Image (tube, coloured by chain):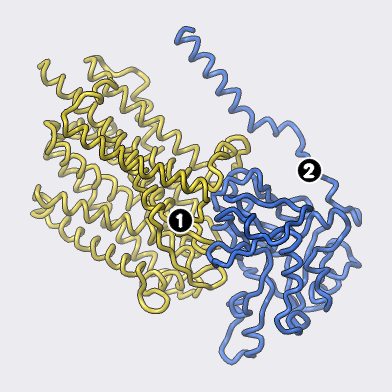
Chain colours: A blue, B yellow
Amino acid sequence: MKRRDFLKLAILTLSGISIKPFAHLFTKPVFADISIQRTNKGLPRWAMVVNLSICGKKGGCTDCIDACNRIHNIPRITNPKHEVKWIWNIPFDRVFREQNFDNMNEGLREKSVLVLCNHCENPPCVSVCPTKATWKREDGIVMMDYHRCIGCRYCIAACPYGARSFNWKDPRPYIKEIDKGFPIRTRGVVEKCNFCEERIAKNLLPACVEACKEGGLIFGDVNKEDSEVRKILSTRLSIRRKPHLGTEPKVYYIL
Amino acid sequence: MVEKALKGTKRYWTWIGFLLFLILIGFVSYLFQLKEGLGITGMGRDISWGLYIANFTFLVGVAASAVMVVLPYYLHSFVQFGRITILGEFLAVAAVVMTVLFIVIDLGQPSRVFNVLLYPSFSSLLFWDMVVLSGYLLLNLFSGWYTLDAEDKEEPPRRWVKPLILISIPWAISIHTVTAFIFSGLSARPFWLTAILAPRFLASAFASGPSLLILLCYILKKFTKFNVGKEAIQKVALIVTYAMLINFFFLLVELFTVFYSAIPDHKGHFIYLFLGSNGPGMLSVFMWFSIALSICSLVLLIRPETRRNESLLPWICSMVLVSIWIEKGLALLIPGFIPTPLHDIASYVPTLPEVFITLGVYGIGGLIITGLFKIAVEVQKSKEKRI
């Protein structure tokens, strides 16, 4: 092959490849529609309410956390640097630092508060991801594709809630009982709470909500007027984490 | 021209051997990291970027700073920069290659790196950084190489070289701006969330890159007959002086806003950086050391007698380099993460394999600089012979 021909061919090939990203402009995005329940006319908007006046009454209860860890094959790594967490407890004064003041109720200050991915309406993690490995679904759930993620951890830097975990090592040896219903992640990818989208698809409540026998967690579609979450949010005062950032979290806390 | 890099004295080959040794150690450590995962580094869930990204940021600056010699030479026909310009372009090539390597070794799944091209996300600054960095690499490689090639063949440079060089000038600004935007657009990290970050990055780049260039020129002068000329070095030193001044000014501007407004979320990071959490930690010591170095070097640079002192200048440049390597390396990254979004304190110390891998990347950069500079030196030599 002559040098000129080779160059021609190379340029042609490269330009062919470079068109690819734009090809989707002419096709409609295809979503896995099966997982979206059409409970009313519009799309659902999933939200969770954590009722802090109920949650924590049973001292040291971790039923919700355990349920989540079990069904999502979350490794139990003792080294705090390498921990993987989807839902966990933190003292109130660290979750809601801006609500802190001197002489505040000590019980509230030290109260354990459940934290998880907020499934933001405007998720900063999604805009920074260079491969669209994390994206917001039409029903608002922020998803992770463990097979596309390159492990750059830009989303971890972008999340204002510390809700994302990276697999610093192979998680498999740290999982006590493997649940075959959910994928085990590989080392080198990011993961986080998925609002139990795999259960929502089957018309089930998220595992944490189901596990809470006291009813401290309420989950539902805020777009549905008669849903429980909608009723609570429209009648009671609720707070969200770092609302000033404009991320519009969909996990609400009532005191 | 490549063959010119393959002939050399024993000393040349010993140096190459040393670099290859560094690369080998780095490579073996990297294989270990590939097998075990990034858990072998000092990074963790709170400080999730470390030494690799710190060096990445620093080196993007070095790469961008080539513009400080290219611009005066090509736009203002500043002839004294004739020889140093080619070195600046080649330094940029090596620096960009290192930045790309630092990104790749920081990935948890490096084999999937091409997903960035397969599923590009135009809202991600990391995607744009990849675009501008690879473009900048090609621009500098082609313009440097073909300028030298023309000199070697005693022909006028090809017609398309000059436009490439002109494009590379704004392009250099873009690579460091985009790199700053990676950080300064994150609402989650108040330490980085400041519009002054990109200007600060550029100022510190135009101090650190040219300092490194001056040091390399001194090394070339010592070991070869290649001399860029006193005039050129002094002009570059002047550029370093102004850039250092502006960089220091920008730091003070940032500190004013943070401490006068006294918003706890912003202040917390700076207090951690300068004072530590429970008394000064390693990071605070480093930061004060960096500030001390930059003040000392500024004093020495501003005084004409010391700046013009040829035996002092390499030391001043080394001070500038170390100061900025700390300032926009770990002292930029760690306080961004600490206190964490959950108001926690964590610590980060790079591990030995992490340091080896980093040194390995610098070994590759060193090898590229050595090879390219060697070619430049040989072209010059044969040109002088002909005269």
Q: Residue at x 25, y 14 (%)?
A: B155
Q: Amino acid at mark 1?
A: Thr
Q: Are marks 1 and 2 on the same chain?
A: no
Side of B331 where B194 appears, left or right: right
Q: Position of residue B379 (x, y in %)?
A: 20, 22
Res. B164 image quadrant: top left
* Above or below, comparing residue B12 to residue B300 in the picture: above
**Chain under callout 1:** B
Q: Secondary structure at mark 2?
A: loop
Q: Position of residue B28 (x, y in %)?
A: 41, 43
Q: Position of residue B269 (x, y in %)?
A: 45, 69
* Above or below, comparing residue B293 to residue B72 in the picture: below
Quadrant the C terminus of chain B occupies = top left
Q: Residue furthest bottom?
A: A103
Quadrant the N terminus of chain B occupies = top left
Q: Residue at x 15, y 58 (%)?
A: B300
Q: Residue furthest top?
A: A2
Q: Secondary structure at mark 1?
A: loop
The nearer-to-camera label among 1 and 2 is: 1
Q: Position of residue B55 (x, y in %)?
A: 38, 50
Q: CA distance from mark 1 to mark 2?
A: 38 Å
Instruction: State the residue in front, B75 or B304.
Output: B304
Q: Amino acid at mark 2?
A: Phe
- Residue B199 visible in rendering: no
Question: Alpha-carbon neighbours of circle 2 within 10 Å: few (<14), some, or many (≥20)?
Answer: few
Question: Residue at label 1?
Answer: B41
Question: Residue at label 2?
Answer: A31
